[in-house]
Image (spheres, rainbow, N blue to C red):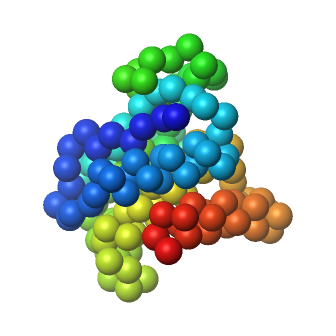
């Protein structure tokens, strides 16, 4: 099972227990057992805009970028960094206002969505969207309902 580790705490509250539950549900339902840590990092809007431009050729602020660093995770130790999610807290908070979600729940929604992207899920076609949405809903329901 992989672990989710917040490297720097955001200005909003979150629960490490909830992140652990998200990791457990994803690991049990989507992944084979894998080792490694997924770091969660928060940076300012200009920093994430620069990363978005460099890695995706999109010159704008985004809520989250995801990176994976290995082709296989089998030989990793639990503390080895396997993935990173780079968040823009200001963008999350603005989406909270736009979508009427509490910022902590918006954060968890983005974590689930981003981990699924790292695992190869996408939403470029209607079929891919439906498949990814199915897994997002499964994880959300298992953790929050």
Extreme residue toward the left, this view: 11
Q: In which quadrant of the rendered view does residue 12 lie?
A: bottom left
Q: In which quadrant of the rendered view does residue 131 lie?
A: bottom right
Q: Tell me which residue sits at (51%, 26%) in the image.
A: 35
Seen in the picture, residue 90 relative to 43 is either above or below; the reply is below
The answer to whether residue 17 is visible is: yes
Q: Is residue 89 left or right of residue 119?
A: left
The answer to whether residue 129 is visible is: no
Q: Tell me which residue sits at (30%, 51%) in the image.
A: 16
Please state the horizontal and vertical placement of residue 143, each as a whole percent of the image: 48, 64
Please state the horizontal and vertical placement of residue 10, each as a whole percent of the image: 21, 55
Figure disc tally? 0
Seen in the picture, residue 74 relative to 103 is either above or below; the reply is above
Extreme residue toward the top, this view: 75
Please state the horizontal and vertical placement of residue 114, each as a whole percent of the image: 52, 52
Q: Tell me which residue sits at (65%, 40%) in the image.
A: 31
Q: Is residue 106 left or right of residue 56?
A: left
Q: Is residue 28 left or right of residue 69?
A: right
Q: In which quadrant of the rendered view does residue 102 lie?
A: bottom left
């Amino acid at each position: 099972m992989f672990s989710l580790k917040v490297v720097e705490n955001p200005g909003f509250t979150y629960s490490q227990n909830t992140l652990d539950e998200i990791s457990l549900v994803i690991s049990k339902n989507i992944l084979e057992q894998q080792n490694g840590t997924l770091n969660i990092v928060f940076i300012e809007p200009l920093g994430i805009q620069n990363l978005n431009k460099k890695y995706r050729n999109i010159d704008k602020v985004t809520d989250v970028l995801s990176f994976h660093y290995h082709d296989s995770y089998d030989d990793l130790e639990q503390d080895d960094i396997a993935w990173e999610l780079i968040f823009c807290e200001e963008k999350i908070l603005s989406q909270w206002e736009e979508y009427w979600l509490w910022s902590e729940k918006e954060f968890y929604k983005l974590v689930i969505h981003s981990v699924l992207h790292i695992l190869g899920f996408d939403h470029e076609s209607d079929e891919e969207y439906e498949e990814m949405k199915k897994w997002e809903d499964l994880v959300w329901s298992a953790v929050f309902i």
